[in-house]
Amino acid sequence: MNLYYIAHVANAVGGLVFTTKPAKSVDSDFSKNFNEVTATNEGIKVVNLIDSNDPLAIVKDEVTKDSDDNIFTLATTAEVLFNNLPYLNGLQNSKIVIHAQLPKDEFSYVSSLKDSGFTILLSNNALEAHDMSIVAYLLATAISRPVLHFFSPSDACTEKNASFLDQYTIRAIIHQVIHYFDTTTCLEETKIKQLIENFKVDVGTDAYNTNNKITAGDVDELIEKSFKTIAAITGNSYKSFEYIGPAYPEDVLVILGNAGWKLSKDAQNFNAGILNIRVYRPFNFENFLKNLPNSVKRLLTIEQSLQINQFQNLLLDILNNFEKLQERNIKQVVASQLGSFTNSAEVVSKLIENSRSSKPVQNLFVDITKVISSAHKLELAYFKILEQVFGSKLNILNKLDSNLKNIGTETNPEFGFGKFLFEKEQREKLIKLIQTSITENEFQSPRAAELVELLSEWVVSSNDKTETVDKADQIIALLKEDESNAASQLLKYEHYFHKNSSWLVGSDSWSYDLGSSGVHHLISSGENVNMIVFDNEPYEVVKKNKSLYRKKDIGLYAMNFGNVYVASVAVYSSYTQVLQAVVEASNFDGPSIILAYLPYESENDDSLKILQETKKSVDAGYWPLYRYNPTYEDNNEEVFKLDSSNIKKELQDFLDKENKLTLLTKKDPLLSRNLTYSLTSDIKTKQKQKAKEAYDSLLEGLTGPPLTIAFASDGGNAESLAKRLGKRGAARGLKTFVLAMDDLTLEDLAIETNLVFITSTAGQGEFPQNGRNLWDAIKNAPDLDLPNLKVAIFGLGDSAYWPRKEDKHYYNKPCKDLSKRLSLLGVQELAPLGLGDDQDADGYQTGYAEWEPKLWEALGVSGAVSVDEPPPITNEDIKIASDYLRGTIVEGLNDQSTGAIAANDQQLTKFHGIYMQDDRDIRDERKSEGLEPAYAFMARLRLPGGAATPQQWLKIDELADTRGNGTMKITTRATFQLHGVVKHDLKAAIRGMNSVLLDTLGACGDVNRNVMVSALPSNAKVHKQIAHTSYVVSEHLLPQTTAYHEIWLEGVDDNDVSPNDPKVWESRKDGPRKKKVLVSGNALVDQEPLYGPTYLPRKFKVVITVPPYNDVDVYAHDVGLIAIVDKDNIVTGYNVTVGGGMGTTHNNKKTYPRTGSLFGFIPYDKVHIACEKIMLVQRDFGDRKNRKHARLKYTIDDMGVDVYKQKVEELMGFKFERPVPFEIDSNIDYFGWIKDESGLNHYTCFIENGRVEDTPELPHKTGLREIAHYLIKVGQGEFRLTGNQHMLISNIADTDLAGVKSLLSKYKLDNTNYSGLRLSSAACVALPTCGLAMAESERYLPVLISKLEESLEEYGLKHDSIVMRMTGCPNGCSRPWLAEVALIGKAPGAYNLMLGGGYYGQRLNKLYRSSIKEDEILDILKPLFKKWSLERQDGEHFGDFLIRTGVIKPTTEGKYFHDDVPEEA
Ligand code: SF4
């Protein structure tokens, strides 16, 4: 009856109807019903297609040909639909309703199509089939997209008094409601009119038909409307999710199937409810939750299927919304499968028992016959899919045992391929035997004629893998009846009659050596064999595991052959795509490779973890989803289909080559963005070649000998030395050419004449990055002979970098190793090895000055007169030439050929708050693949006072997700940083920030930086005053250039979220300046009244604190303002400290950290003037020649504190008053709740090292977003950032306290129960983004602290505060030099240990041990902590204790920082 009513509705709708049937001669139930019903409609046309004849290909052709916007119907079975998966995509934009009949109790077909993009409806009986058919046509007509209607088989219409509609009414609903056709109807006219009005609001307009951007929300809305329409006419009501059961259940069974009604009564006995799914796609999760009673604690997702699947799609639908489940307090989701059953009580009891047990079994399969109580191996998920698609036709070629235990790990593709070839040979023999026996008419049985016909058919179609009706069993049965010799010969090959789909199953271990692994052999064979290769490596593991560099991309490798089908799939990302790929691969005539991703670290990983890992990899482009079918070219179809939005660089290169790029880019703008991000080498290589050609032609006129200079350089010194040497050589008439060492190959060495290497020293005596490949090649070349090559080598190193005797050999190790190795290979020495040492009087220049003349002498050009060399370009040159910070930033942003900007512009963007960085975790990998580094930018906000409104918080949160790397960093200057912003997104990110009145101007660069203040939750009145002062100082010292506005903000931009965005900043009174235009129309030129065109020699930092707190580390900055507060909480003024600063250079004793010197008191209204004048003295007297000596701290020491102060006073025109006494007692944050004097509440959260992100354990980012929404709702509250990288939820009224507390608790932001050490710790960003980092910091300090905490607990120190800080380099961003314990990165895994800093930031620490590793750090610190616990005096802090007990000497002043360092350090 179901079919009858579907035919009834389809007939009423009219148009072209396709039905499928197994064979020409047989009528299917579909065709019978349609023939019967359609007799009443002359306008309808029915086309019968054959199941095995790719019916959807024909449907697709017909539908895409249609230009009249007709509606189509396809009535078929779920199996046929499934076998035709590859054609589904072709129907995407068609107005077609597909009615697919499911096999009894088998709903896995429904979830298989979850990612098809089609709307999916389900019905279980005749009445539902009738009603859902109407809904399907309404939807398909309205959205011009396919709608899939799955229905269960049923023989009889069981509904009594069911209200089926007559055809006129149905036609009226479909046509009148949507198109206002004037059709006779048996409905009252008024009712129809009412319906039309009802629908018109949303779909009566043509908008839905013409607008391609139909969202899931639109479809949901239409479904609701359609259900209402049905209810209005028939009284039958439907919902997308239909709940039946008790009002307050704790368990709910969510069922994809038709068992819900049967189970509901028994479920009630367990106080459990049932949620039936009527609309499976779009899966509206809000709606899903709305239909669940609030009391639910556990969800049981149940897919009805007779086959045991490893993988449950419904579970993933739910887990995809994990956070929302948590919000609803749903603690558990258990997936089960339901096979056939009779005893519903038993089924319900098993399911609920499992769900309520302490360790529920995932993927429990409940069937009348068996219960499978444990999951299969994870990677069998794909195997199950192959089984699902091919059933008994699946032939795993390298299956070693029935349990498949060894699949993909120990078996080799060669093995399976050999088996394939053997089977092929046997099949060919069989074909020959059949041909002979038919020709010679050898069969004897009475059914010989039938047998011959079947055998002939079989031979003809023997290579047709798509044939779905397998005649093998029929043939074998007839052969067994035949007693002829021919029959018995053929039966020997019985196994080969079946048309199998043959697969090799392997692991990514095959990717390591494609040449010898057999993969190459298989790909190049052209044989019709399929291979599925698993990759289980999570993205994070790949990034960390350097040993995987040799792993090759098999997909890319195969695509380059041009005749291989290749797909990259991930079952946890798109199930439908996996199925499509598997079917397409099997149908492809030639080798096929499917790369199947399933990231997990252990077999115990749960679905949520795998889902998240998969998402990360697919979204990041690490694992793009695609399908590549070279035969599509013949049909003018796209050969490459990208099924995810991100793509890897290598793939993009490949597509580029295939000339498909333009098409793809047009189709997918997001792809364009990613391409821009990663597009690198091609254009650059071409440019490089051009430059070399130009240079070569320039050298044509030169007559001297050739000289190639190869450098290996991380920091740039070796490179600039090489370039200078090149210029000097050319000036002497030599044909010089300068390049990075890795741009040379071994083959080049054999043809070079004179070669100079200049290399610096990295890490533990290693070659810098751009020299490692050539060095590895030279080192490992077994039979290289270079007798004609003349070589000179100069190395740069630091003889004091590794102070311990046993490490001394690292000094200049690369150049020494290279020299030794080359002399073994027989090269001639052009000049003796030159060693540059940073410890020499002029640094490495001392050694170089001696070495270079020897080189000229050897080349016979020592007497040549050199032309004047232009002086090197300095930062000062860049600033002055930049036209007030413009440079060529705009051109750089528009240059799509690279993700970087020009080197000079990188200096200038800092003034705009923007740093260019690259992901150093993948630098080596990209380099090894010939790619430029993964460039991205860090954008830092200017946030004077450190406070953000909830709206501003939400915007930064949004930009972090849409433009950055998904996280926000709270910095040590109490502002935000976004990391990972690619060039293409930079402007949009900056505009987004400005749309909420936040800017980045002056957040970095040689100007006044963000003005930071104490968080001071305890005193609102004082905080307001200091926040105001910070604003005044920040605005007063803000650069006046209009370049910022011109580059980032001028005009409108396609990426603006709202057209009103520009209005926000255009009407702003403060912040970045806009260009003023005179009445005459001329623009005023920029001026910098305070800075001048060269700005400051280095950065300038101002902070404000309020005693006794020092959470800003007032002594660490150029200017420290210590607020003096009277008894009425009025800030009368500030004690001013000058000359603090942190940055140093390892082993350079001329650099040191310094604490500020106290100048005196300044009244509050003059403080911005004092800051200005202090800055101006530094502007005029700071060192502009040597940036390492350019900070104010050196100027003040060089000049003398009194002289500096005097100069400031002269400029101010008044003197500093005597400092007002004050007392400071700590520099850490105070966590937890505090009420201020006005009655408002403030909560300081612990955000470890300032990284705001979501992890499965700590969903902080989501939590803070929810709190921001809450604060907006209640209309009060703000976020306050601290200089220790934590954060306050501030200004919370008592009435809102409970709301905020509950959100804090829900998102685990209310935990401050950490050790005193952890709460007092801070780390800078360092790796992977900071280009200066020598070692880990943010990612490592938490780990190290965990290793110390156990001992601290043992010594009773768990709650004692110890200020511990870490940085990845000596620049000191987290102010390590003031910590009681500090670790400063020196090389990967190696740190300098500093001890003895003052607890409240008043005293610098001192080097205790240099270059030590974790075990040494722990061995030193643990006993010291123990000693402190036993011997400390009352209230004595750790740093003070170390000094009192003589462990370390105190650093009394910055300039004595390097004195009294222990000898063994
Ligand atoms: S201290 Fe060094 S490594 Fe750390 S963020 Fe600052 S510059 Fe980078």
Image (cartoon, rainbow, N blue to C red):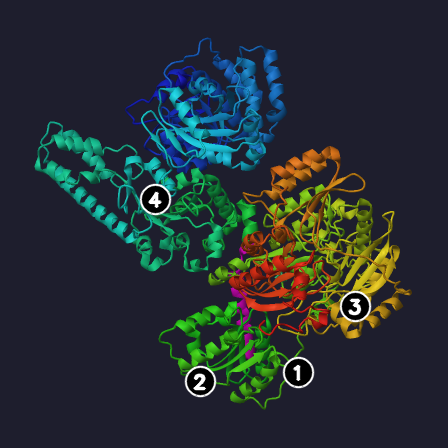
User: As rendered, which of 239 and 296 lies closer to the eye?
Assistant: 296
Q: Is residue 192 visible?
A: yes
Question: Label 1 neighbourhood size at 10 Å, few (<14), some (14-19), many (20+)?
Answer: few
Quarter of the image that includes the C terminus = bottom right
Could you say which is closer to the camera, residue 275 or residue 1246? 1246
**Mark 3 highlights which residue?**
1179
Relative to 202, is 83 on the left or the right?
left
> What's the residue type where badge 1 is placed?
Asp
Residue 854 image position (x, y, % from top left): 54, 87
How many labels sit on residues? Answer: 4
Q: Which is in the foreground here, disc 1 or disc 4?
A: 1
In magenta, the rendered stretch is 676-700
**Closer to the N terminus: mark 2 or mark 3?**
2
Q: Is mark 3 within 8 Å of ligand 1?
A: no
Instruction: For marks 4 and 2, give the one nearer the viewer.
Output: 2
Say which label, 1 or 3, has the lower sequence index: 1
Q: Which residue is mark 1?
A: 868
- Badge 1 vs badge 3, beta-carbon distance below 8 Å: no
Alpha carbons under labels 1 and 4: distance apart: 68 Å
Q: CA distance from mark 1 to mark 2?
A: 31 Å
Cβ atoms under marks 4 and 2 closer than 8 Å? no
- Whether 1401 is drawn above or below 1282: the answer is below
Tag 1 near tag 4, CB within 8 Å: no
Asked whether disc 2 touches disc 3, contact meaning CB atoms under 8 Å apart, the reply is no
- Left or right of 901 on screen, residue 121: left
Q: Nearer the viewer, mark 2 or mark 3?
A: 3
Q: Residues within 10 Å of mark 3 (few under 14, many from 20)?
A: many
Question: Real-space Cα distance between discs 3 and 4?
Answer: 72 Å
